[in-house]
Image (cartoon, grey):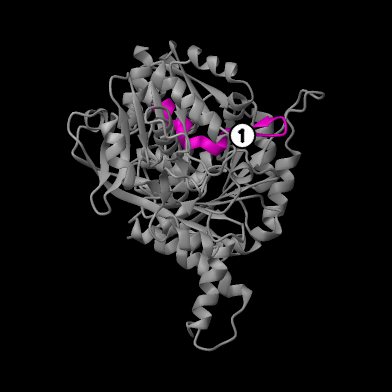
Amino acid sequence: MEQRYIFVVGGVMSGVGKGTVTASLGRVLKGKGYKVTAIKIDPYINVDAGTMNPVEHGEVFVTLDGDETDQDIGNYERFLDIDIYKDNYMTTGRIYQSVIERERNLGYGGRCVEVVPDVPNEVIERIKRAGEKAEADFVLIEVGGTLGEYQNVLFLEAARLMRLKDPEHVRYIMLGYMPVPPSIGEMKTKPTQYAIRTMMGAGLTPDFVVARSEQMIDEPRRKKLSFTCGIKPECVIGSPNVDSIYKVPMMFEDQEFGDRVLESFGLEAKASSAMRDWRSMVEGIEAAKEEVKIGVVGKYFSTGDFVLSDVYISVLEAIKHASWAQGKRPVIEWLNAESYEKDIDNIKELDDLDGVVVPGGFGSRGIEGKILAIRYCRENKIPYFGLCYGMQCAVIEYARTVLGWEDANTTEIDPESTHPVIDFMKGQQENVDEARYGGTMRLGGYKCDLQDKTTAKQAYGASQVTERHRHRYEFNNQFRKDLEDAGLVFSGVNPEQDLVEIVEVKDHPFFVGVQFHPEFQSRPLAPHPLFMAFLRAAINQ
């Protein structure tokens, strides 16, 4: 199958939307009848995203085959409505690790191994392998960071070599930032012009420039950028701020971005109405006026004076998907678990919410506040949805409050607890003792059997599902009968390991905790069933 490759690189600033641009263009090309996959390149020496600080790097997105990746992989899955696998994520560390392992195994035939061309060739080999496995017509490759960063040189060299060898099948897109300084009140092109010059210095000339700014680029500036990099004005694509990233594909479609890309490859659209479902979804977002208020109780929210929603991006998107699908506009409140530990009266803010989510996490910080919030939701009939750590905290709360086991805890926090209702999974104690952290958790998709006449079974409408995991600790089956006798419902269990996957509380609008991460499988055109059920209960409140 003939693959075509499109590299997306960034100008003078990271974090302005390369992932969204990549995912949105992919959606547009898919809407024109082509099969699309996307790759993320992270310049970090880390082998994967699993050991990166979430405050610095954002969410760790877990693929179905158990890779811990950058959050942009999640955007690709949501926009393209496909599962993306380990082959589609690479880091500097992963590339060097592969080259070194190959050299140690005489994979280079005993010759001297050099940074150039062997490292770029490894990058190229991975890109081509991912495209072939996906049987894609188009492979979109997002290069993380910016053009001027030293750590990106080898990835840019890979892009240059691919075009040198096969100019008909490789294109470059440069995402440039176009500020509008308040003191000037005029959109400035110089940062993007400098980025283009830097890109040309690396041997790459952009075929398209995407102008990111607060507002749509005007014609004079479009022509100026066109002149700077020698492309047609219509190949300068505006990407102004929007209130929902799901509107970006339609904005690109209105500027005929996809048609221009196809034209550059000598192709035409195969379909003309495949974007209809996406446009309908966006219209639904616009039409949703009535609010549903959801509180997210977490700890990774801020750095200094800035809120970092990227830490829980898949959770937030899953809430939005389910809200929009039911015609509601989600209003998400950030709730600091530690504030409840300092003053219990602060917890009354939960009364103003329609539902509460406790997402995944690690460590002791804020855990007692989360447990207090969970108890308040359970006793006051506020819809509650616990994800991974949120499920574990729900079990701890139930054991303490209903059974009176005051020291019930997870061994992650209290190894001396006489009621360790959450404990290490088999083999995980050894991993921690020997400091084997990277890629050693229970990762990826696992089966879950659902019990009849439960909230989970009703939500899924199936007897067995597969969900993605990322954890070292699990429910301790030693205490299962006591908790079951006390009224806790174990509605989902992994058939291979008898691992409790879902817990519920009876006679409650919605009280469900899951050991897995359902947010990773939610899509704007296919919201996750459990989030749909949770939002339905919240709306009914």
Residue at left 45%, top 38%? 408
User: In the image, 150: left or right of 134?
Assistant: right
State the SS at label 1.
loop
User: Which of 534 and 526 lies nearest the eye of the viewer?
Assistant: 534
Three-letter residue code for mark 1: Leu
Q: Picture quarter containing residue 114?
A: bottom right
Q: Position of residue 389 (x, y in %)?
A: 46, 39
Q: Position of residue 214 (x, y in %)?
A: 65, 27
Q: Quadrant of the C terminus?
A: top left
Q: Picture quarter containing residue 93?
A: bottom right
Q: Position of residue 53 (x, y in %)?
A: 61, 48
User: In the image, 103: left or right of 514?
Assistant: right
Residue at left 70%, top 59%? 150
Q: Residue furthest bottom?
A: 110
Residue at left 55%, top 76%? 100
Residue 267 seen in render: no
Q: Picture quarter containing residue 516?
A: top left
Magenta residues (range) = 300-321
Q: Position of residue 187 (x, y in %)?
A: 72, 29
Per the image, the residue denoted by label 1 is 308
User: In the image, 256: left or right of 309?
Assistant: left
Q: Quadrant of the N terminus?
A: bottom left
User: Which of 426 and 315 lies nearest the eye of the viewer?
Assistant: 426
Can residue 312 be found in the magenta stretch? yes
Can residue 187 be found in the magenta stretch? no
Q: Residue furthest right?
A: 183
Neighbourhood count class around disc 1 (C-alpha, 10 Å): few under 14, some 14–19, many 20 upward: some
Up-down: is 169 above or below 208?
below
User: In the image, 193: left or right of 383?
Assistant: right
